[in-house]
Image (tube, rainbow, N blue to C red):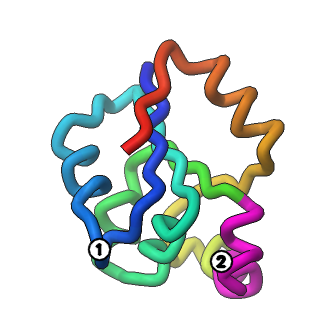
Amino acid sequence: MILHHIQTSVMTGDALTTCLRYIHPNDSILLSSDAVNCLLQTQWQQRLVNITLFVLQDDVVARGLSDRLTIMLANKAAGSFDIIDYSQFVEQSLLHEKVITW
């Protein structure tokens, strides 16, 4: 079980695309930094719908996305994901066998 930590925007890099080629059904993805913006795009919402997904809260707040993502979660517009803080990030890194940062 791997935690895939994606940091780069889908607009400037292919980290998320590459990750999705290799991801195992038991793996999880953590979106941080500019990668959180992908949740605003329908095609990425659809591609991530069946994946255990975490989003780093500080990066959501820093980009002014808190309200939008909260509404998306309530409407299940982007599937299901958990918005987590840094201590929960550490907890997830310990629960997974390995962490790969893309």
| 57, 82: nearer the viewer | 57
Residue drawn at 56 percent across, 63 percent down: 33
Q: Which mark is residue 12?
A: 1
Q: Amino acid at mark 2?
A: Leu
Residue 42 figure quarter: bottom left
Q: Is residue 101 magenta?
A: no
Magenta stretch?
Answer: 57-71
Which residue position holds label 2?
69
Secondary element type, mark 2: helix
| 88, 47: nearer the viewer | 88
**Residue 26 position in % (x across, y down):** 40, 26
Q: Nearer the viewer, mark 1 or mark 2?
A: 1
Q: Is residue 31 above or below residue 4?
A: below
Residue drawn at 57 percent across, 57 percent down: 32
**Residue 73 position in % (x across, y down):** 65, 71
Residue drawn at 74 percent across, 27 percent down: 91
